[in-house]
Amino acid sequence: MLAEYLTQKVWCHRLQSTPEIARKLYHAASDIFIAERQRQLSLTKRVEKVTVLCHGVRDSANPVKLFMNKNLSTPYSCTRHLGEPYIKQTAISLVNGKPHHMHEPLTDDCEIEFLHFKQDDPSIVNKAFWRSCSFVLGSVLDIVFKQEHGVQLCESRDFPIESGSFAYDFKAKLGNWQPTQMELQIMSQAIKKFSYRNGRHAFIQPLTTSIEKAKEIFHSSRDKLAQLERLSATQDTASLYQMARHVDVIDGPLISNIGHIGRFTITAIHKLKEEGDGVCLYRAQGVALPASITMHSWTYQSLVANAMPLNESEEIVEEDGEEKPSLESHQ
């Protein structure tokens, strides 16, 4: 039964029924994230200028030169000088040829390209979109179930677009539950409910911080601490992202805001294995389209059907010169 596992009002009812102690833990990660982000910004005591050359602006062969604030201004700040179309359309930027989150401060003189979903080669922005959908899927799982089912987020899976679905692994006490199509539909609508509550273009904010600070942020999550411990073997910092009160560890960069997400469908939840004490490991999967991409309903339902079987693909390994799949190849 739907009421056994999910609230009827997926977003707001779930928050209202959360015990106070769980609400404090949920907000604690976000509060520490915000405090650390403000601390990093406060390290800039004196405002210095950097020169930013913006390429491909207004179909001009010559870059537009902007003078921005070092360690404070972001690519998004630049778009506010270029006009409304760049604010709305740009999902991610290239800074000196490397993918860069729109809300990540600029640290030196640089050259910028603003990427959107309808450009000639959308592979970079498509990959950021797919990862962002995994991040959003995690935020839905974090809030949609009733508290007694003890949902614990594990890790987003960095599957390629050509695998057919993005995914997120989580643990919970759900017994023999197998979600119906109605339940999956209600869960999918949670992101729309979030948009209505927080603004259609709610920002996804980045933070690069030390592994130790990241462990402080996720001190109440055993699985996130384990993920950070694995990262510490090869790096000293962790990439975190925040959307409203949801914070997660995920390789970026992601898209700038959830307004770029159009159709969003959670297609399946697969039980992977039993962990003991009634806890099982699950994999939630989904498919989505950018808001700027239109597709016939029949075609989209074909994508939904393809995203239902368990995704066991190899995760993406970055290699120079590797061709990235495009969302447009599915149309």
Image: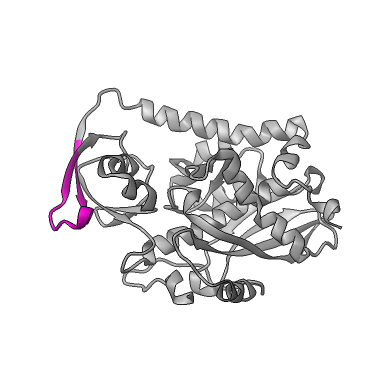
The verdict on residue 53 being magenta is: yes
Image-based side of 6 in relation to 230, left or right: right
When asked about the image quadrant of residue 288, the answer is bottom right
Q: Residue at coordinates 56% horizontally, 39% vertically from top-left?
A: 198
Q: Residue at coordinates 32% horizontally, 68% vertically from top-left?
A: 121
Q: For residue 127, say whether it is visible.
A: yes
Residue farthest to the front, as pictured: 296
When asked about the image quadrant of residue 14, the answer is top right
Q: How many marks?
A: 0
Q: Position of residue 306 (x, y in %)?
A: 61, 76
Residue farthest to the left, as pictured: 62
Image-based side of 49 in relation to 21, left or right: left
In front of the other: 41 or 290: 290
Query: Where are the magenta residues, as a range?
Result: 50-66
The verdict on residue 238 being magenta is: no
Image vertical order of residue 1 relative to residue 297, above or below: above
Q: Position of residue 75 (x, y in %)?
A: 31, 44
In front of the other: 34 or 255: 255
Q: Residue at coordinates 29% horizontally, 44% vertically from top-left?
A: 83
Placement of the N terminus among the 4 image quadrants: bottom right
In front of the other: 80 or 72: 80
**Colour scheme employed for the rendering of this structure:** one colour
Q: Position of residue 266 (x, y in %)?
A: 65, 62
In front of the other: 149 or 328: 328
Image-based side of 49 in relation to 38, left or right: left
Q: For residue 232, say whether it is visible.
A: no
When asked about the image quadrant of residue 73, the answer is top left
Q: Position of residue 49 (x, y in %)?
A: 20, 33
